[in-house]
Amino acid sequence: MKKILIVFTVILIAFLFTSCATMQYEVIKKYDKFNGLTTQSMNHNFMESDKFIGGRYAFDIARFSDKEHLPVYILYIDYIGSDWVFISKGESLVMLLDGKKLIFTGDGSFENRHVYSGTVHEIASYNITKDDLFDIVNAKKIDVRVYGDDYNADLYFSNENKKRINDFYLKYIIND
């Protein structure tokens, strides 16, 4: 299953590069008939910031499932901007959900750093549980910090971000 997730992460990244021109939020649904893997993923759910941070950060969720295994959920932080962040390895994503801290550990963006049409693009992925997603969906105030080797970005969820996460959760995750 891990090999399948790696392959689909690469496919998702390739799709993100081809859709960078529009930068509009969407949910992508795919089924691979050769391995039976179904994927639903959020794309371009850009968060807000009160200060200039050199780019835009998207908080995207992907759900991978097949008939033999329980679904797997991956959280992606997708940065698009003018300068490198070098999203750190380790505890590089921290969320405050109504003041309660939720920490995510990942490999950083080392494997997923690219320049596309003169724009820097980094993606960091994190495993996330259904319980964590439930907590995010039910939080009233959501603040996010992304740790980079060069600087940190403090962001927050707008009402639109909350609605998108809630809709995705209700449509694809709640019944897992």
Image (tube, rainbow, N blue to C red):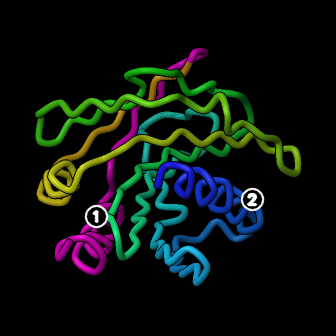
Span shown in magenta:
149-176
Q: Callout 1, which amino acid?
A: Leu
- Residue 17: which numbered mark, if any? 2
What residue is at 50 percent from the left and 78 percent from the top? Answer: 36
Q: Callout 2, which amino acid?
A: Phe
When the figure is inspected, residue 173 is found, relative to residue 75, above or below; the finding is below
Looking at the picture, tell me which residue is in the foreground, 57 or 176.
176
- In the picture as drawn, the residue positioned furthest to the front comes out as 68
Looking at the picture, tell me which residue is in the foreground, 141 or 60.
60
What residue is at 28 percent from the left and 64 percent from the top? Answer: 70
Q: Is residue 35 magenta?
A: no
User: With 88 as the anchor, is 119 left or right in this view?
Assistant: right
- Residue 169's x, y, as percent? 26, 70
When the figure is inspected, residue 112 is found, relative to residue 173, above or below; the finding is above
Q: Secondary structure at mark 1?
A: loop
- Residue 103's x, y, as percent? 27, 30
Q: Quadrant of residue 44?
A: bottom right
- Residue 29: which numbered mark, if any? none
Q: Is residue 151 magenta?
A: yes
- Residue 71's x, y, as percent? 32, 64
Q: Secondary structure at mark 2?
A: helix
Marks 2 and 1 in Cβ contact (< 8 Å): no
Query: Mark 1: few, some, or many residues within 10 Å (few <14, many ≥20)?
Result: few
Query: Mark 2: few, some, or many residues within 10 Å (few <14, many ≥20)?
Result: some
When the figure is inspected, residue 96 is found, relative to residue 127, above or below; the finding is above
The residue under label 1 is 70
Looking at the picture, tell me which residue is in the foreground, 137 or 160.
137
Precedes in sequence: disc 2 or disc 1: 2
Real-space CA distance between mark 2 and mark 1, rounded to the nearest whole angstrom: 29 Å
- In the picture as drawn, the residue positioned furthest to the right comes out as 117
